[in-house]
Amino acid sequence: MTCNVMEMEKELRSFTALVETTLLQDLHIRSEKPHDPIRVKKVPKEWECIGTGNYAAVFMHQQHKEWVVKVYARDVEGLEKEAAVYEKLGVHPSYSSLLHKETYYLILQRLKGMTLYDAFHKGVRIPESVIEDINEALDYARKRGLNPYDVHGKNVMMEDGKGYVVDVSDFYKKGEDSKWRDLVRAYYKIYLPFFYKYPIPVPYLLLDMVRHSYRFYKKLRKLFQKDA
């Protein structure tokens, strides 16, 4: 074992103790609705919430910005499945790496950047290379026996023209999910010809309306297909 590996393990042990004694002791998160993001009620000093999903919230410590802690508020069985997904993914430039696992949280390598959802909101251009990187990363996951599921604008990121997949927690699920395919279609048919040339900020309220309308449309379509 090299000195670098030993030092890394020592730092991880120290960071894990910090998570246990500071973050988890005073953290208050709650899952109010299954399809809505986790509500973060209280975050301990020196910790920052940098993201929320339907199952968990992600936190970063001010002195350890290279790592993040994903704390599950519900569906703890999903944590074990997410850890297994990271094991199957191995090392890939568009995915994070799992560093440590406990009953209610994971410690992950931090991916820096802006979500595509926030890029739409701020009027920041989304280069085609970002879409291509994410497409390649999802193909890689399929080759590793995984099923990229629930991939959308809130859980993919970009930084310096490169694309990253932030959330792989549903890659173990079966069935087909068209969110990313629909987003890519909208990117090439609507975003690239118009919004990329003339980027304008889009209010979160409007983006959320589009998100909820899309979800409603998919439910209706599924219902009609079932009755047909």
Image (tube, helix red, strand yellow):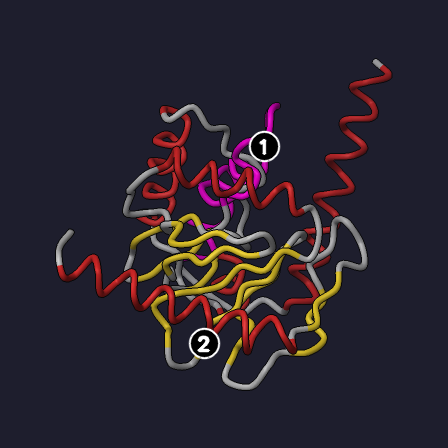
Q: Within the magenta stretch, is there residue 60?
A: no
Q: At which x and y percent is residue 110?
A: 38, 62
Q: At which x and y percent is residue 140?
A: 34, 31
Asked whether 56 or 115 is in front, the reply is 56
Q: What residue appears at the point 72 percent right and 75 percent down from the top-left corner?
A: 41
User: Does the image show residue 193?
Assistant: no
Is 182 positioned to the left or the right of 112 in the image?
A: right
The quadrant holding residue 2 is: bottom left
Q: At which x and y percent is residue 172?
A: 54, 31
Is 40 positioned to the left or the right of 109 in the image?
A: right
* Residues tagged 2 and 1 counted as in contact (Cβ below 8 A): no
Q: Residue furthest left?
A: 2
Asked whether 182 or 198 is in front, the reply is 182
Q: Residue furthest top?
A: 228
Q: At which x and y percent is residue 90?
A: 32, 38
Which residue carries the number 1 mark? 178
Q: Within the magenta stretch, is there residue 182?
A: yes
Q: Nearer the viewer, mark 2 or mark 1?
A: 2
Q: Residue furthest right?
A: 227
Q: 27 above or below 4?
A: below
- Looking at the picture, which amino acid does disc 1 mark? Ser
Q: What are the residue bounds of the magenta stretch?
A: 168-196
- Looking at the picture, which amino acid does disc 2 mark? His
Q: 160 above or below 47?
A: above
Q: How many marks?
A: 2
- Neighbour tally class for label 2: few under 14, some 14-19, many 20 plus, Cα within 10 Å: many
Q: What residue appears at the point 75 percent right and 64 percent down from the top-left corner?
A: 30
The quadrant holding residue 222 is: top right
Which residue carries the number 2 mark? 61
